[in-house]
Image (cartoon, rainbow, N blue to C red):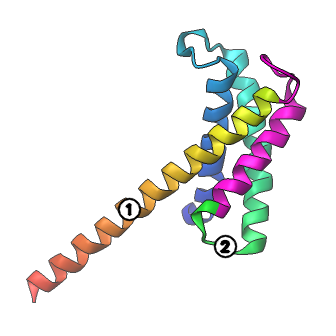
Amino acid sequence: MNKKAAPFIEYFSESTVACLVTMAQGNLLAMTVSHLVIASQTGVIAAAIATVGILLTNTRKRWLISAVLGVTTAIVDFYVHPGMFGSAATEAIVTGLAAGVLSYLAGTALRYFKARQEYRVIGAEIADD
């Protein structure tokens, strides 16, 4: 069950963090509980839509997964709350870009660490022989 929930949790956290930081305009001290509630709403909806979309396409391409999450986050953010800076869509676009970049970086880092762990396990098995 843990492996099945992992993509949703990953997408939720990336979308929520991107929305939270963008809403506070990078000022981490200005974040409030209401910011977290709004960002969590964006994160849950965007993660659910992105998870279903990515599962239906059955893709493993990191750039495509990041693009889907970024676009989904931007659209959901636009409808969940009004923008705090720029035009009506500016904050949503910035949030979507941040979610996409964060998703790409986190996914690449996870893939790197998994490959490194597998390499260590294989190396230990060879050493035991």
Q: Is residue 5 above or below residue 32?
A: below
The first of marks 2 and 1 along the sequence is: 2
Locate residue 88: give its quadrant.
top right
Residue at 83% over, 40% down = 76
Residue 95: image location, x then y, percent: 70, 34
Residue at 67% over, 16% down = 33
Circle 2 residue = 59
Badge 2 crowding class, 10 Å Cα cut-off, few under 14, some 14 to 19, many 20 or more, is few
Residue at 61% over, 33% down = 17
Q: Is residue 39 left or right of residue 29?
A: right
Locate residue 127: give its quadrant.
bottom left
Q: Is 32 in the magenta? A: no
Magenta residues, start to end:
64-89
Element class at badge 2: loop
Circle 1 residue = 112
Most foreground residue, 21 or 120: 21
Element class at badge 1: helix
Q: Is residue 67 left or right of residue 124?
A: right
